[in-house]
Image (cartoon, rainbow, N blue to C red):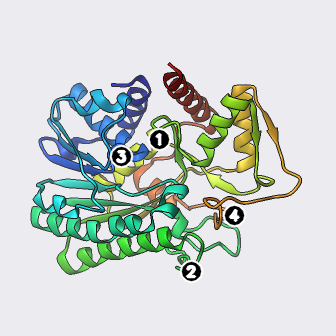
Amino acid sequence: MNRAYFTCAESALAHCSLEPLVGRTLLVTGATGLLGSHLCAAVVLANQRHGLGIRLIATSRSPPPPWLAGLFAAPHVHFEPVDLSADPDWLIRQTFDAVVHGATYGQPKRFLEQPFETIRLNGRALELLLERANQCGARVLFLSTSEIYAPSATGHAVTEDHPCQSPLGARGIYTSAKIFGETLCRAYAEQEGLPTRVARVSSVYGPGVRCDDHRVIYEFIRRAMKSHRIALLDQGAQERCWLYAADATAMLFWVLLHSKQAVYNVAGTERRSILQLAELIAAETGASVELPHESRTESHTAGSPQSVHPDIRRLAQESGLLESVELQEGVAASVDWMRERLHEEQT
């Protein structure tokens, strides 16, 4: 297993038990993405360390990148490249005891460029997955997003009961698809008694992305390494609660396996601005940060919320989990990851 993945998986397993999955089958869709791949790595390490015998079915639209090849070749793991937006019927031919549906696009550039795929993955594919899960008696975790929340008038952290965004916004395709997915989960829970859970995930980062990932933290790291400068589009006042991949993995497994309520915010607790993030990356890489004279936007930044501050008290009080990796430490690990990937591209 890749060293960075091993470290994250070890940290996640120290905070959340996978014992309920002993001898059972877990399906992970979107398995080569940032969240999906770390969930899979935790399962593989749990099998190796504790002999849990968890059978993992992992699927993603594209074949595994080189750093995941060993992971998906591990014992008890079956990987199959399937585009669920084009072939959702693949799901109804699977048998499993639990499923994490993460087959969607986390990068704004991608979900804005592929709106119909985004809708189908969170709509038709999820509906078939829920139907099959109901037949199998399986637990379901749907990965939603904190972007569904409307802006908070008070600026306070938003709870799981906070109102949702209008479907007419610049990112309405993405947020509305996630809201519809949550509605499907609720319908199956109420009408069929299916144990569904929703995780509204916010700003996860860490090792595990390709060099061309367009999320802001990786854009900044890439610019810092290639040109030794991070030029911001605006004053960097937008705020996010960043959550390292290892902590997100532990929280998501807890929601899937141990939680009692239907919906949970999954996020960090400390707000940091985009400018503060850039400054951390600059300090780690020796780059400079440059602010523009006039602010501008790009297609994938339009409609980005000014502040994303989910309230995670529900999760923290029930599970005892909070982030264990501080942003500075996580940024350093992310820089190391991107440095290795860029080096591989050049050799």
Residue 139 appearing in the image: yes
- Residue 245 circle label: 1
Q: Residues within 10 Å of mark 2 (few under 14, many from 20)?
A: few
Q: How far, Cα to Cα, is label 4 from label 1?
A: 23 Å
Circles 4 and 1: CB distance less than 8 Å?
no
**CA–CA distance in space, label 2 to label 4:** 17 Å
Image height of 307 relative to 5, above or below:
below
Q: Residue at the location (76% across, 30% down)?
A: 287
Q: As shown in the figure, which amino acid type bears the numbered disc 3?
A: Gly
Residue depth check, mark 2 versus mark 1: number of the one nearer the observer: 2
- In 3D space, how far apart are the residues under numbered discs 3 and 2 (Cα atoms)? 29 Å
Residue type at mark 2: give it.
Answer: Leu
Upstream in sequence: badge 4 or badge 3: 3
Tell me: 222 left or right of 234. left
Camera-nearest residue between 183 and 90: 90
Q: Is residue 261 visible?
A: no
157 or 166: which is nearer to us?
A: 166
Instruction: Looking at this view, name the residue that lies furthest to the right.
Output: 293
Q: Secondary structure at mark 1?
A: helix
Residue under pointer 3: 36
Q: Give the mark nearer the N terminus: 1 vs 3.
A: 3
- Determine which quarter of the picture holds residue 8: top left
Viewer-nearest of discs 3 and 2: 2
The secondary element bearing badge 3 is classed as helix
Pick whichever of labels 2 and 1 is earlier in the sequence. 2
Q: Are marks 3 and 2 in contact (CB under 8 Å)?
A: no
